[in-house]
Amino acid sequence: MDEVSTSVARWAAKDPERAAVIDEHATLSYGVLNERANRWVGALQAAGVSPGEGILLMLPNRVEFIEVLVATIRADVVPYFMNSNVTYYMANEVIDLAAATRARLLITTGEFMRDLALHKEVPFTIWCVDEVDITAYPNTEAPLTKRGTDMVFFTSGTTGTPKGIIVAKSVFNLRLPISSHMMEPRLHMLIKPLSFRGSMTTACNILQEGNTIVVARQSIAIWMKLIERYNIFFINLGPSDLMRWLDDLERIGAKFPSSVKHIMTIGEPLTSAMKLRIKELPMHLQVTDLYGTSELGAIAMINDNEWASKDGSCGRPVFFITVRIVDENNRDLPAEEIGEVWVKTRYRMRAYYDDPDATSEACVDDFIRTGDIGFLDEQGYLYLCGRKHDMIKRSGFRIFPGEVENVLREASGVEDAVVIGIYHLERIQEPIAFIRLREPMDAEAEMKKRLEILAFCESRLARYKVPAEVWFVNEIPLNAAGKADRLELARRLVRPNVNG
């Protein structure tokens, strides 16, 4: 990430008033960002954090996140990024992470600290960015020698101990050509948390190009206010964020903002139903659907002008990335055959944090097993069918939930669908479908719709792939990554009110 730090310093010298990062409360120019990052270096040194040591970062999308990020590059310390959704952590998990990483400092907000019920008696220092006066620290130059430290992205703890992914800072050096033109910066809004690798990569790209990052929290009202105030050109968000936004615009009868010319979705690939909704948006809008993982970064992408000819695909591999489709015996499969997706890229993770067993299981030679199931077509386009561990085994047959979900989303009146496997005494597992309808229905109409959906599945799928049951829900619960929370849906089957 040295290129990011260098770019900030270069733009600060060349055009100090140029806007670098904006949130709903503040705007930082490149000149101010450069100075405040240096003062954060002084603050880290004053806290006794030496090069090579680590700090925990638990910050929402706000300008201070970028300040601290640049400071960690310059101070050559290891940032441990924690998910900014505070509801996914308990106080004891934060304390355990600090002990495991030997981090001496947690940088967070007063709100997060209160929500977590953390106290300053914990065995590490806590700094709240809304309380720290960073101007009180010296404008400190970066150390001359660098160790080449890493950064670690921690997932949320929704399924157990948070999993850390170690990524070398060098993979965020995108080697972009230095522009000699003084063009006006374009404003790029990031909605997914900056603590996610996809958002971090985009933020680095924006700073290296001398453009402007606009960071927004998970509030549609804030997004709209920022878009209107700054005429946002580009938006980076997750498919679930986009769905909520379009639902909200439809509910209030508002038009899609004319300033937005490009949307990139990251996380899970867009569904066919979402692509149909996007096609109804203004003609000037370009949409790019990007598939990637925290372990690997970007893997494949596809633009909206390719959707018609490659329906269901998440695109072709990008950035000199190699994709293999492998069977259960680690043998390569031909085009159109379904297997596990393996990826080779220079942007890969270094390892899972403090988990050599998981690392050795995921890494095979120069490839990483993604855990995703899919296939390549004859033109090299990638199609995903679901997660390997989500695969359902029914009476000796294998069912990939993604295939069934895609069919369900094409049924009349269906907005979204998730299929999970539930234990069955005779068949090992049964596929159960959770469906969000576009319009609410009464009990009698739901009964008819359920039969209609099952009949539609029977016309499109092999009999063993047809869901054993269909449950209607008001919302599909999401995990911290914005993906369907299948564990929560499984829990709902044993609750009296699945619509909760």
Image (cartoon, rainbow, N blue to C red):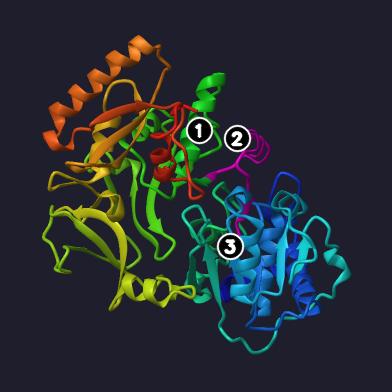
Q: Amino acid at mark 1?
A: Arg
- Span shown in magenta: 210-234
Give the SS element for disc 3: loop
Calculate the distance from the C-alpha at mark 2 to the C-alpha at mark 1: 8 Å
Q: Quadrant of the N terminus?
A: bottom right
* Residue at 45% from the left image edge and 47% from the top image edge: 264
**Residue type marked 2:** Ile
For the residue carrying disc 1, how many other residues have a C-alpha within 10 Å: few (<14), some (14-19), or many (20+)?
few
Between the residue at mark 2 and the residue at mark 3, the CA separation in whole angstroms equals 35 Å
Residue 225 magenta-drawn? yes
Which disc number belongs to residue 181?
3
Residue most extreme to the right: 136
Task: Residue at 34% x, 41% y: name it.
Answer: 304
Closer-to-camera residue (224/440): 440
- Residue 220 badge: 2
Q: Residue at x 33, y 70 (%)?
A: 362
Element class at badge 2: helix
